């Protein structure tokens, strides 16, 4: 999971632009008059995401019979996502906030959409709340196993509020050498709280990251297998290990917890692999 900078605009900013050209004047005025309720929901989200109590937010809140769930979700779908509407500028700002255009949930795939951290289907009043909207790849947006947590432990990591990049926590191991298979897992630092350890573990599981990273690891191995084979056969174990270690250090300097960093580390630490059993 990659930390990214949270949006620097409020739900009130988004709301005003989204409904600027709304033709239903009565609905437009009612929405303007309800700005404080949007702001209150935004404040509640911010206070609870920091304390890992988002599961306490009430679901299916509507503002009135007129500003119901359908209308609230429609402001996002029809007026924030819509490329012809003024609210699209906020969608675009969040969309491009992920470094290198990579999804912060998996750190691998390209951003394709915005993910509602708490789904708009259950939390319609948060549909256009900036801090509830995170740039995401399509898979992380659709395949997340837990979209409405029922406890603090089930609250997956939030890219705006959780920063774990300065710690080593992603690991990999070789399950079999012929054919080669990998398993990725998390090993949180001992100094972390039990809650953060559990949330990381659940995040890793919820976004199916072992499956994703293992596939990339096998592909990476196949791409370098000939090179490693020549190194081992021509120069021996020590040169092979030195090369793998250089690959690890280089990737570690960029991202301590990338699947590539864990990949090269597990190759280096596996004695059977370094002794040529992969050939």
Image (spheres, helix red, strand yellow):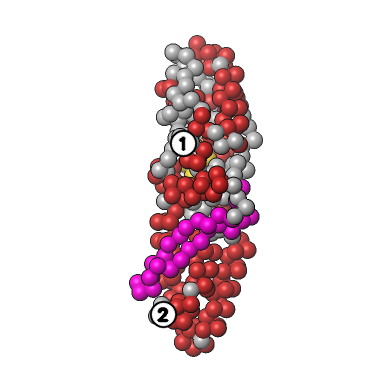
For the image shown, how many numbered marks are present on the structure? 2
Is residue 230 at all visible to an observer of this figure?
Answer: yes
User: Looking at the image, is 201 positioned above or below residue 84?
Assistant: below
Q: Do the residues under discs 1 and 2 have CB atoms within 8 angstroms?
A: no
Measured as percent of width and height from the top left, residue 258 is found at 53, 59
The mark found on residue 115 in the picture is none
Measured as percent of width and height from the top left, residue 204 is found at 47, 50
Q: Residues within 10 Å of mark 2 (few under 14, many from 20)?
A: few
Residue 181 part of the magenta-drawn span: yes
The residue shown at (50%, 41%) is 153
Q: 112 or 132, which lies in front?
A: 132
The residue shown at (42%, 29%) is 121
- Kindly state the secondary structure of the residue where label 2 is placed: helix
Measured as percent of width and height from the top left, residue 88 is found at 53, 33
Q: Which numbered disc flags the more N-terminal residue, 1 or 2? A: 1
The residue shown at (53%, 13%) is 30
Q: Which residue is mark 2?
A: 277
- Kindly state the secondary structure of the residue where label 1 is placed: loop
Measured as percent of width and height from the top left, residue 134 is found at 53, 40
Which residues, given as a range, are shown in magenta? Answer: 163-189
Q: 189 or 181, which lies in front?
A: 189
Screen quadrant of the C terminus:
bottom left
Q: Which residue is mark 1?
A: 149
Question: Which residue of the protein is positioned furthest toward the left in this rendering?
Answer: 179
The residue shown at (46%, 36%) is 149
């Amino acid at each position: 999971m990659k930390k990214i900078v949270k949006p620097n605009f409020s739900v009130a900013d988004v709301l005003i632009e989204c409904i600027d050209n709304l033709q239903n004047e009565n609905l437009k005025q009612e929405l303007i008059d309800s700005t404080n309720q949007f702001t209150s929901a935004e404040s509640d989200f911010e206070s609870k995401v920091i304390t890992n109590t988002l599961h306490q937010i009430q679901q299916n809140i509507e503002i009135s019979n007129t500003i119901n769930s359908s209308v609230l979700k429609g402001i996002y779908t029809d007026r924030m996502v819509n490329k012809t509407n003024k609210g699209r500028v906020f969608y675009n700002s969040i969309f491009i906030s992920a470094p290198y255009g990579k999804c912060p949930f998996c750190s691998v795939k390209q951003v394709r959409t915005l993910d509602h951290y708490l789904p708009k289907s259950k939390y319609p009043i948060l549909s256009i709340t900036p801090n509830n909207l995170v740039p995401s790849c399509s898979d992380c947006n659709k395949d997340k196993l837990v979209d409405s947590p029922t406890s603090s432990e089930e609250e997956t990591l939030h890219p705006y509020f959780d920063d774990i990049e300065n710690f080593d926590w992603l690991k990999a191991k070789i399950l079999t050498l012929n054919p080669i298979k990998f398993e990725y897992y998390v090993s949180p630092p001992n100094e972390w709280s039990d809650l953060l350890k559990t949330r990381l573990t659940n995040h890793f599981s919820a976004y199916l990251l072992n499956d994703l990273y293992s596939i990339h690891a096998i592909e990476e191995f196949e791409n370098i297998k000939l090179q490693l084979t020549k190194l081992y056969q021509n120069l021996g174990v020590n040169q092979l290990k030195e090369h793998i270690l250089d690959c690890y250090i280089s990737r570690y300097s960029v991202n301590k917890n990338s699947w590539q960093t864990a990949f090269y580390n597990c190759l280096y630490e596996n004695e059977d692999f370094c002794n040529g059993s992969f050939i």
